[in-house]
Amino acid sequence: MSAVDGRSGILLVDKPQGITSHDAVSRTRKAAGTKKVGHAGTLDPMATGLLVLGINSATRLLTFVVGLDKEYLATIRLGASTTTDDAEGEPLEVASAASVAAISAAAAETDLHNFLGTINQVPSSVSAIKVDGKRAYTLARAGETVELAPRSVTISTIELLGSRAGDGFLDLDVRVECSSGTYIRAIARDLGAALGVGGHLTALRRTRIGPFSIDDATGTQDMDVASALISPAAAAARLFPTWHLTTSQAVDLGNGKRIALTLDPAPDGLIAAVDPLGHLVGLVERNGALAKTVANFPRDDPAEASGTAPVESAQ
């Protein structure tokens, strides 16, 4: 384990199955030697894969990561529905072996393609959505009936990678690229309902969030946070166009002044403003001929590591 000594940055973590995202954040706090660790979206204990964490002042970048599109690898089991739409729930209805055997992988793939595009999806009842101030999963696990309104989500890719037939079930391995807020468990549930045999998720792995890939992630055991940390400037460069400032521009922008936007052509949307030493000064946007600061990023201070409250707390 290696502490970051007051440094800030983005850390990509590969969460294993069986621990919560909060557990992963807690391990990171210990390994990094700071309490200022936040996340850009959690994973269920059953799920594995990519968590994007912010360390110290880089937690400010997480706001711009949360809503990015995502990629998942999942296994959908046709033949039974469960109370949680995944393998951790209790069975609700189990189809006959003959009904499941009558469904070919090709037919299932055809129905999968019906989920492509912008659709209205009813989230899983064990989601983290709040109902009357309480998390839906808390109410569902207490035995209460939870009815959630459909939400508009966009599924840009849904690909059948393989299938395996078993005794009374058909497993489909799929790859899904989707907008933030999409529930893969709900796809499994709805596919099973459409085919008349029920369905639930048996495996889920998040492999990408926006430009951040699981290929660059570190495990939660024996974490070397210092070497795996992506600097705020490098992380911001994956998210936004980069504007390389002069020393005087960096000083003025850091002091809250609006300066001439000399990036040509000046793009729409957010821009990462970086000083000559490679430090992220702030995120700016065009305001006429000037650059308006949307979020500033102070230079790292070792004292930051002794803070007591994370900017974004784990849920």
Image (cartoon, helix red, strand yellow):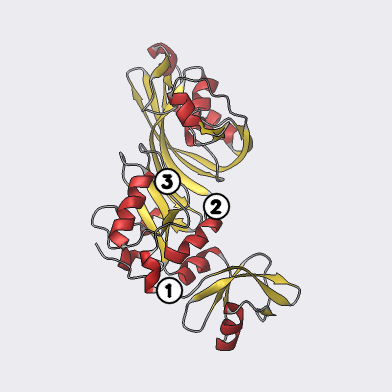
Q: Kindly state the secondary structure of the residue where label 2 is placed.
A: loop
Dot label at residue 206: 3
Residue at the image point whose x is 57% and y is 84% from the top = 251
Left or right relative to 28: residue 207: right
Where residue 1 appears, as percent x and y from the top left, is: 24, 62
Where residue 20 appears, as percent x and y from the top left, is: 35, 42
In the image, 275 versus 297, the foreground residue is 297
Sequence order check, earlier mark of 2 and 1? 2
Q: Kindly state the secondary structure of the residue where label 1 is placed.
A: loop
**Distance from label 2 to label 1 (Cα)?**
26 Å
Where residue 3 appears, as percent x and y from the top left, is: 29, 66
Residue 299 vertical position relative to residue 146 in the rendered view, above or below: below
In the image, 156 versus 183, the foreground residue is 183
The amino acid at mark 2 is: Leu
Residue at the image point whose x is 41% and y is 29% from the top = 86
Residue 90 visible to an observer of this rendering: yes
Residue annotated with mark 1? 300
